Image: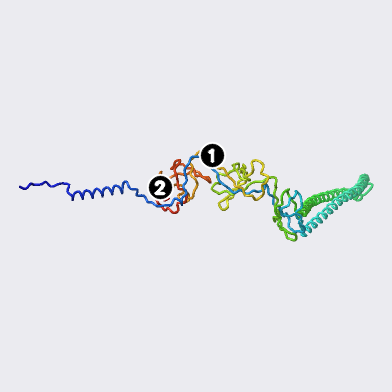
Amino acid sequence: MDKIRKKKFWNNQRLAVFGGSGILIAFVLYTFVFADGRSKLNVQTDRLTISTVKQGKFDEYIILQGVVQPLKTVRVDAIVGGHVVQKLAEGGSMVKEGDVLLMLENQSLQLSFLQSETEANRLVNDLQNTRQRLKVDKFTLQKNLATLDYQIAQAHEEFKRNEQLWNGKAISEAEYNKAKREYERLARQREIEMQSQNYQEENSHIQINQLEGTLNRTERNVGLWRKNLDNLSIKAPIAGLLSSIDVEIGSNIAQGQNIAQIDDLSGFKVRAEIDEHYISRVFVGLKATCEFSDQKIPIVISKVYPEVRNGRFKADFVFEKSSPADLRRGLTLPTYLELGKSAQSLLLPVGAFFSDSGGSWVYVLDSSGNRATKRAITLGRKNPDYYEVLSGLSVGEQVITSSYSGFGNKEVLMLNK
């Protein structure tokens, strides 16, 4: 007798369906949960620069190229123009203060001096003649007054005598009036003579004052012309090294033209150009050091030039102590300008990565060293060797600091040795 057999639930068909579904679910879970879906790029490690983040002292400074210059340089310009008749010094020679460098000739200037001197002499003569005439007029006045006083005295006596005779009816009224009119005429003539002489004297004093003022101005002009003639001898204003003199005998020199330059060798300074980015942080008194003969020499900013050209401005440095004996004009010295105080910080070596990421992210190696992942960071100050790390990195982590230009926007770099 046949037996009824129960149908099994886990038959081959169901096992196949559930097995396939499980595999599919596992694949989906791995793909969306466990698998790393970030973009990747294979990179050869021998093409990379890998740096280690470390803790250390951060010195904020910039490196400049300082050029040695004399502490003081004096330009020698032609005060007056002319053509060179003598050249008494050559570039590169030492000169003393007052040494004649060039002799110029200017005939127009010499003629103007002679004309001015002649005019001054004429004014001197006019002034002397006017003063002499005033004295003569005074003597003439005294003589005329003496004569008039004598005539007035006689006329007064005659008038008084005739007055008595007329009162006594001894003379006619006509004779009396004639004597009276003569006396009054002479008295009036004396008054007019005094007024005339006073006017002439006042006029003469005015002429003398005018002549004296004109003479003083003319004499000052003569002095200026004479000084200009002296300026035809071009002299050294200070003692030092005549670094250049760019004229030859026979050449014409214009007024105000630069002729030579004299360096005061009693001391030196260092002049450097600085990027305009630092203009707000550079000031007089800021300290720096320069390298010379394997020594670091302290210097300090003495002057900052505010004018910016081609994105750079200039500053002068002086030595805190005496300048080295072997310095020469034109030497280039590496100069380290301190912009802030030293501080303990996380340090990341400077590299080309900054131009690609702007310092906002870097590729950081994992513990295996086989791959590097993009990570956001924050950088602070910078010196020629290191960036100051503010956040995003830890001591001992390794960072790719070479250029990122060939990596595109890949999130992960697979490092192949």
Q: Position of residue 382 (x, y in %)?
A: 51, 45
Q: Residue at x 20, y 48 (%)?
A: 15
| Residue wearing tag 2 | 370
The x, y position of residue 146, in whole percent, is 91, 47
2 and 1 marks in contact (CB < 8 Å):
no
The amino acid marked with disc number 1 is: Ser
In the image: residue 19, left or right of residue 51: left
What is the count of numbered marks? 2
In primary-sequence order, the first of circles 2 and 1 is: 1
Which label sits in the foreground, 2 or 1?
2
Residue 166 shows in the view: no
Asked whether, in this view, residue 297 is left or right of residue 143, the answer is left
The residue that disc 1 covers is: 342
The image quarter in which residue 267 lies: top right
* Residue at the farthest left position: 1
Viewer-proximal residue among 188 and 393: 393
Q: Residues within 10 Å of mark 2 (few under 14, many from 20)?
A: few
Residue 105, horizontal then vertical, whole percent:
77, 58
Visible residue check, residue 309: yes
> Residue 191 or 212: which is nearer the viewer?
212
Q: Outermost residue toward the front? A: 1
Residue type pointed to by label 2: Asn
